[in-house]
Image (tube, helix red, strand yellow):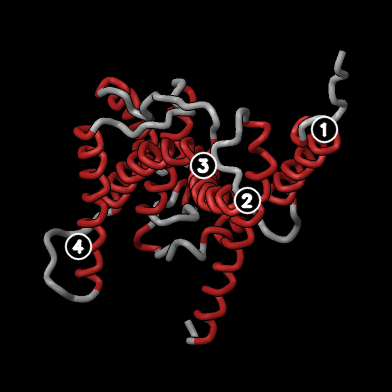
Amino acid sequence: MAQKSQLQPIDERPWMVSIQALFYLGLFAALMFYPGTSLLERLHWLDSGICAQLPGHSFYPGGQPLPLCARNTGIYLGFIVTLLMLYATGHGRAQRLPRWPIIVVLLVGALALVVDGFNSLFLDLGLRHLYQPHNLLRLATGLATGLALAALSLPALNYLFWREDNRQRSVPSWTTLILLIPGLVFSFFAVVSQSGLILYPVALLSTAGIVTLVSSVNLLLIVTIGKRDQTFTRYRELLPFFSLALLLALGEMLLLAQLKFSLLSMFGM
């Protein structure tokens, strides 16, 4: 009788699990308890390389600015909220895009952000524009774009990662799309309320949206370069690769923040 191999898959080795746990605990501790600045200031710095953080384009829950402007708050909050809802409703491993009519509706929402963005830019440049920009529109079109980004990117990532074929669509029906809307509507009114109670939840969730999106791009590259596409069967197998992608994402965001600071200092701004 052939003896079973004593070798464990790398993701099941106790030392690997311990290292991953310490890695995430260390990141959390650094974010929450590193001395010298507040959590909100650290989030502002981390996000500053990606967002202009213009005072007039921001919301101020409890009198303090969110780390992202209204449009970016909408995009990344909408992205992470939609992603969480897709996983909660059992669509987390879907490998097929929605049907074309639903894709068109999602893209129309993203197109609204493009139109609103150019309209705001034209005003800033002193050019003719369609209407007076408003943070409510920036937030709403951002949330719609975040919804589209999550619903359309998740199947592509799943197709790349998982060995098992999953014919499920990320948004299989109009009913599913409608069920995703309340989370975005709640997010909209939570931000608009500008209550101090939502300051940290929104700041953390929107920043998590950026980190997740940048990490996903890194993970895609790592898996492709390492020729590990379509080889994973469980999340635990993917976690070490995601941990590396997350570490790179944080480094990239900090590098962008420092680069922005250096450029602004160079030009005396």
Foreground mark, 3 or 2? 2
- Cβ–Cβ below 8 Å for labels 2 and 4? no
Horizontal side, residue 4 vs residue 166: left or right: right
- Confirm or deny contact between disc 3 and disc 2 (CB under 8 A): no
- Label 4 crowding class (10 Å Cα cut-off): few <14, some 14-19, many 20+? some
- The residue nearer to you, when weighing 230 against 73, is 230
Residue type at mark 3 is Leu
Q: Residue furthest front?
A: 1
Q: Are marks 1 and 3 in contact (CB under 8 Å)?
A: no
State the image quarter where residue 24 is shown.
top right
Check residue 205 in the rendering and tell me which mark sits there, or answer none: 3
Which of 240/121 is in front? 240
Which residue has dot 2 on it? Answer: 226
202 relative to 116, above or below? above
Q: Position of residue 194 (x, y in %)?
A: 41, 44
Q: Position of residue 197 (x, y in %)?
A: 51, 38
Asked whether the viewer can see residue 207, the reply is no
Q: Amino acid at mark 2?
A: Gly
* Label placed on residue 119: 4
Identify the residue under disc 1.
Answer: 13
Label whose residue precedes the other's in the sequence (1 or 3): 1
Identify which amino acid the numbered label 1 is placed on: Arg
Across and down, in percent, residue 195 comes to 44, 40
Where residue 225 appears, as percent x and y from the top left, is 58, 54
Closer to the chain start, of discs 1 and 2, is 1
Q: Earlier in the sequence, mark 1 or mark 4?
A: 1
